[in-house]
Amino acid sequence: MEVIQIKDKRFRTFIPEADILKEVSRVAREISRDLKDERPLFLSVLNGAFMFTADLMKRVDIPCEVSFVRLSSYEGTSSTGKVKELVGLSEDISGRTVVIVEDIVDTGLTMRQLVGTLQARNPKDIRIATLLVKPDKLQVELKLDYVAMRIPNDFIVGYGLDYDGLGRNYRDIYTIAE
Ligand code: IMP
């Protein structure tokens, strides 16, 4: 087990790269099977999903497109609370099958809001592919079509996920060490 230090926190190896890739391959097979006639548009949510997206796309073997979006947080008015604005979507998604590629679904609020924003652009279908989900923290009803791994509530880093901007480059996933 490897222990790493990022700023004030220590993390230990939790999911090694080989185990991650096994599950990413399974998800790629499921998507390729389900959407072979759809020419889906994969929408990767930056920054966290960049590594998952690269490994997933190398394993999807059907005709498809890939694009990258970002959700920029800003404080809305007191009535709307925290709002995340969708940035970078230049494709016309009307009538298309869209697969959102996300790093981790925690409360699910981010994903629900993104699905709502995309829904307004009249796609044929929206699916969610997430590397990770913390099922015990989900606060909203959300159909997660493709899930690579389910994990406990603890904070994790690596394989694209960060702690205060750091740790995205690690090839394994690390969990907080007590
Ligand atoms: P949600 O809206 O609560 O589902 O939050 C989802 C976002 O929170 C993810 O896209 C991540 O950016 C971030 N996040 C949630 N849990 C973790 C974690 O354990 N490590 C790093 N980022 C996380």
Image: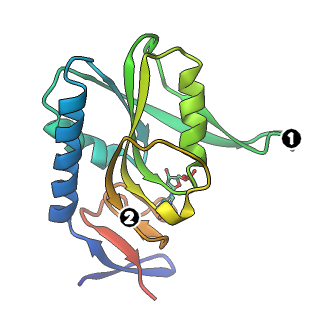
Q: Residue furthest right?
A: 78
Picture coordinates of residue 146, whole percent (x, y): 33, 44
Check the image and report above or below for 96 versus 9.
Answer: above
For mark 2, does the 10 Å Cα neighbourhood hold few (<14), some (14 to 19), or many (20 or more) residues? Answer: many
Q: Is residue 110 left or right of residue 46?
A: right
Disc 2 is placed on an element classified as loop
Residue depicted at 37% across the width and 20% down the height: 97
Please tell me which residue is depicted at 18% across the width and 20% down the height of the picture: 63
Give the distance between the C-alpha atoms of the residues marked 1 and 2, in whole angstroms. Answer: 35 Å
Q: Is residue 106 left or right of residue 98?
A: right
Q: Position of residue 79 (x, y in %)?
A: 86, 41
The residue beneath circle 2 is 167
Residue carrying label 1: 79
Residue 1 image position (x, y, % from top left): 23, 84
Q: Is residue 146 left or right of residue 123?
A: left
Q: Residue at x 35, y 54 (%)?
A: 160
Kindly indicate the quadrant of the structure image that contains residue 159. bottom left
Amino acid carrying label 2: it is: Gly
Give the mark nearer the N terminus: 1 vs 2: 1
Please identify the quarter of the rendering in which residue 177 is found.
Answer: bottom left
Amino acid type shown at disc 1: Ser
Q: Residue furthest bottom?
A: 178
Dot 1 falls on a residue whose secondary structure is loop
Image x and y of residue 56, in percent = 23, 42
Judge from the rendering whether residue 169 lies leftward or rightward of residue 72; answer left or right. left
